[in-house]
Amino acid sequence: MSVKMAVEGVPSNGIQERSTILEVAGHRLTAVSVGGWETCIQFPSYRLAIDIGRCPPTAINMETVAITHAHMDHIGGIGMHVATRTMRKMKPPTYLVPKAILSDFRSLIQAFEKLDGSNWNYEIQEMIPHETSHSLGKGRILKSFPTYHTVPSQGYLLYSQRKKLCDEYAELSSEEISRLRKSGVKVSQSVLTPEVAVPGDSTIQVLEEEEDVRNASLLVIEVTFLDDSSSPEDARRFGHIHIEDVIEKAHLFQNKAVVFTHFSARYSAQEIDDLLKAKLPPELHSKSLALTFNHKVRER
Ligand SMILES: [Zn+2]
Ligand SMILES: [Zn+2]
C-alpha cells in the first residue's frame, strides 16, 4: 500500500489552516474522525466531503457534502459550512442526504438562516440507496447504500465511470464498429468501478451486504471499539463495529487499502496503533492505516 502524507496550508481570508493530506491507494483524502466527537472525510480532488463534523476549516472548500446520518458529531458544523461559503461568495453547496432526514435537515438550515438574519444559497438533494446517482464531474459518480446504525443512515460509494464496448461487438473491426455507431447503434455501455467506499457509522453487516464496499479500491471504515471495555454485543447495539467483528470478517476486506476511523476518544493514538497491530490478521494490518491524528498522544 502506498501512503503519502503532506501537510498543506489552506490560506483563505487571513485564516491559515493546516491539514494533513493522505494519499492512499491513489486517492487523496483529508480526514478527521473520532467517535462521538467529529467525523468529516474530505476528498479534495472532487471537492467532496462525507459528513461535515464540526466543519473543519478546509471543509469550507468542499462543494458537495454527503451526509451519512444526523448524529451531531457528523452534521453539527453544517450551519458554519453554508454560512462561510455564502460569506466568501463561493459556489452554493449541494447537500446530499438520506431521504428520512431530508425535511428536518432543511428545517435545521432554515432555522440557522433565520437566526443569522441571512439568505443562503444551497441545494439539498435526497440520495436513495442503490438508485440515485450524483455526478461529481471528472468521470466520477457518487451513489449510496444502506448502513446499520441507531438512526436512519446510509454510506457512500465513489465510482469511476468509463465507456466499454458491448460484448456482442468485441469481435468486430474498428471500421465495422464505426459504421454501426454512425447508423445509430449503441455499441458501448457505461461501466462503473467502485473506487472509494465510506459507510459512516454502521455495524459490520454493511460488509456482508454490499459487494462494492468489499471490492472498492479504498475502504474508509469505522472501528469504534478495540478492546473489552465494550463488548462486540454492545458495539452492535450502538450500531458500531468492534475489532472482534473485523477479525471475524477479515476475509471480506477485499480492498487494496483500508483506512480505519472513528475510534472511541477513550483510546490514545499509541493504544490504537498497538491494539490494531496486536489483533488484526497481518495481511489486513499491512494494507491498513489508522486515522489517529486527533487522538491524544499520551497513553491512558
Ligand atoms: Zn459517529
Ligand atoms: Zn452515529
Image (cartoon, grey):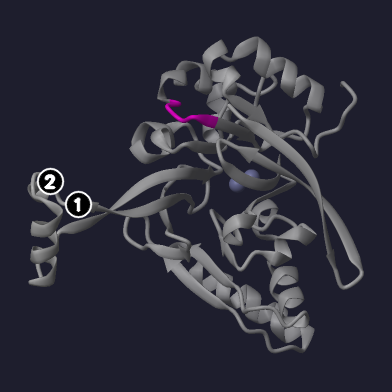
Q: Is residue 236 left or right of residue 182?
A: right
Residue under the point 52% across and 37% down: 219
Q: Is residue 228 visible?
A: no
Label 2 sits on a secondary structure element that is loop
Q: Is residue 14 left or right of residue 120?
A: right
Image position of 29 with respect to 118: above or below: above
Q: Amino acid at mark 1?
A: Leu
Where is residue 207? Give x, y as percent.
42, 33
Foreground pick, 135 / 100: 135
Q: Give, as a single range, the part of the protein colored magenta.
A: 253-257
Residue under the point 8% across and 44% down: 171
Q: Is residue 223 visible?
A: yes
Give the main secondary structure, helix, strand or loop, of the magenta stretch.
loop
Q: Give the mark, 1 or 2, whose residue is nearer the N terminus.
A: 1
Label 1 – label 2 distance at C-alpha: 7 Å
Foreground pick, 131 / 239: 131
Residue 135 location, quadrant: bottom left
Q: Amino acid at mark 2?
A: Ala
- Count of numbered marks: 2
Tag 1 near tag 2, CB within 8 Å: yes
Say which residue label 1 marks: 165
